[in-house]
Amino acid sequence: MKERLENIREEALQAISAADVPEKLNDVRVRFLGKKGELTAVLKGMKAVAPEDRPKVGQMVNETRAAIEKVLEDSKSKMERAIREEKMKREVIDVTLPAKKNMVGHRHPNTIALEEVERIFIGMGYEVVEGPEVEYDLYNFEKLNIPADHPAKDEQDTFYINKDIVLRTQTSPVQARVMEQGKLPIRMIAPGRVFRSDEVDATHSPSFHQIEGLVIDKNISFSDLKGTLEVFAKELFGEDTKTKFRPHHFPFTEPSAEVDVSCFKCKGKGCRFCKGSGWIEILGCGMVHPHVLEMCGIDPEEYTGFAFGVGLERIALLKYEIDDMRLLYENDIRFLKQF
């Protein structure tokens, strides 16, 4: 038995000496000291040893185990120390080298423009309200005085999920939902993404953003609308900005108008930016149609209101003098880092 234990010890020491990576040391541990290892097999064979010799054999097994474990631990420590030193040599840091530039992101030009618009209207007492992008036809069209035979409901212009559900073509449905609640007066803007079946080009996209505003109260007139939009234009484009209202038609409003602002590049003299006219169209607006008020449960004899809508991308394109809407969505770092 003694000779067998000495052979096990000798084999283990040779295997430890030959190991060059920690994994091989672990293999040696399992082979000689594991549950199915050679020393364990010796202990299991103790029943064949005379009872009076068992304590002596057990002591010899423990001494062999201790010797192997000590050499294993010493070899493991030396190996780990050598590996660590080699790793430190490879990963040495030259503190004299220039540091890597930390690339920090920032707000998208659309977000910058939206936050500025929100700041202006919140300063005038408006609240910001959001609504669903997937909307019922009822709210997107019917409650906004757009009947079933209106051209806007054609599938060439609108994305239909089914006959009753669409991807909203405007954020006006949010206004209808708020009016339905009957909590008057109302002063709100509704920013959000909208969808229309348009081909992608420099000025169109099937997905873009709108900001629509609504005021409902007693004794609201068109002069209130004009004053509000004049303040908005001056805050957004500068104190010298002038506004011009042109008659138009929108089913949601009556009377309706389109609003131009004096060109902030040439101050109204005429330039390439305003195509020589001195004016730039920015939004549509009007007094809320009495029929719309009725459909939303508001008495048009007691309450009046105005609404307006502006494209967020249009504001960004104008404010930052961008000539192609596609640049806002291409995620080109060279373009975005300018903002």
Image: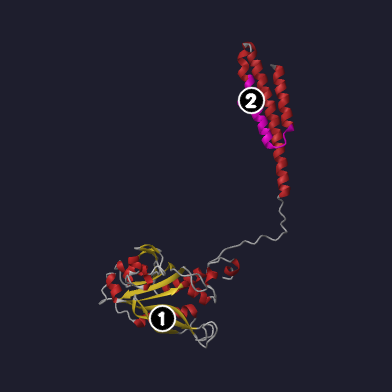
Q: Position of residue 266 (x, y in %)?
A: 54, 85
| Chief SS of the magenta region | helix
Badge number at residue 19: none
Identify whether 128 is placed above or below 278. Answer: above
Q: Which residues are magenta?
A: 18-42
For the N terminus, which image quadrant?
top right
Q: Amino acid at mark 1?
A: Glu
Q: CA distance from mark 1 to mark 2?
A: 90 Å
Badge number at residue 258: 1
Q: Is residue 150 left or right of residue 60?
A: left
Q: Earlier in the sequence, mark 1 or mark 2?
A: 2
For image coordinates 41% across by 78% down, the residue present is 284
Residue 244 is a magenta residue = no
Q: Disc 2 marks which residue? A: 37
Q: Nearer the viewer, residue 266 or 98?
A: 266
Q: Position of residue 138 (x, y in %)?
A: 32, 66
Q: Is residue 269 left or right of residue 142?
A: right
Q: Amino acid at mark 2?
A: Gly
